[in-house]
Image (cartoon, helix red, strand yellow):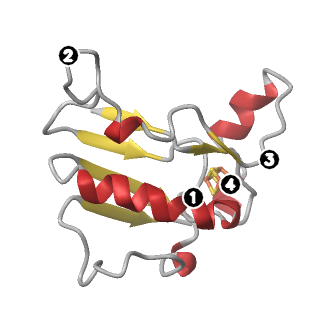
Amino acid sequence: MSVWNPWHGCHKISPGCLNCYMYRRDAEFDKDSSIVTKTSLFRLPIQKSKNGEYKLQTGGYVYTCMTSDFFVEEADDWRKEAWDYIRVRSDLHFYIITKRIQRFGVNLPVDWGSGYENVTICSND
Ligand code: SF4
């Protein structure tokens, strides 16, 4: 299992956000969780080690966007590229939890069809 946090920061939108882990963790470092920024690991799925192999090795689950929401508004443009990485890494399975399922269609890849086989999206409130 791996974690990929392409961006960080979010806005509380539901009662389920009350105890958001990311907000609690950021508060310990006086960090403003409402500012959404790309992380230094944005390109992690396609990054390779010196030996030429992907840093995220084949076959695992990748818990995606655990310090934000994959469908947060500020990431609309970045998400296009993130989908590209997910498409390229069909050997991994990306697991996405969102509270913004209503924004699922924003910048969805044109080849999404009935969904990528390597993606599971879980919607919760
Ligand atoms: S949507 Fe998720 S990441 Fe965003 S504030 Fe709510 S619990 Fe936190």
- Front disc: 1 or 4: 1
Q: Is residue 65 left or right of residue 61?
A: right
Q: Earlier in the sequence, mark 2 or mark 4?
A: 4
- Give the residue type at disc 1: Trp
Q: Where does label 4 land, which residue?
A: 17
Disc 3, ligand 1: is the CB inside 8 Å? Answer: no
88 is higher (above) or lower (below) than 61: below
Q: Quadrant of residue 50?
A: top left
Q: Where does label 2 land, which residue?
A: 51
Q: Is residue 58 left or right of residue 88?
A: left
Residue depicted at x 57% and y 31%: 40
Which circle marks residue 101 in the picture?
A: none
Q: Earlier in the sequence, mark 1 or mark 4?
A: 4
- Front disc: 2 or 4: 2
- Front disc: 4 or 3: 3
Which circle marks residue 35 in the picture?
A: 3
Q: CA distance from mark 1 to mark 3?
A: 15 Å
**Nearest the camera: 86 or 69?**
86
How many residues crowd mark 3 within 10 Å: few (<14), some (14–19), many (20+)?
few
Q: What SS does tag 3 mark?
A: loop
Residue depicted at x 25% and y 84%: 113
- Give the residue type at disc 3: Ile
Would you say the residues marked 1 and 4 are in contact, meaning their CB atoms lie under 8 Å apart? no
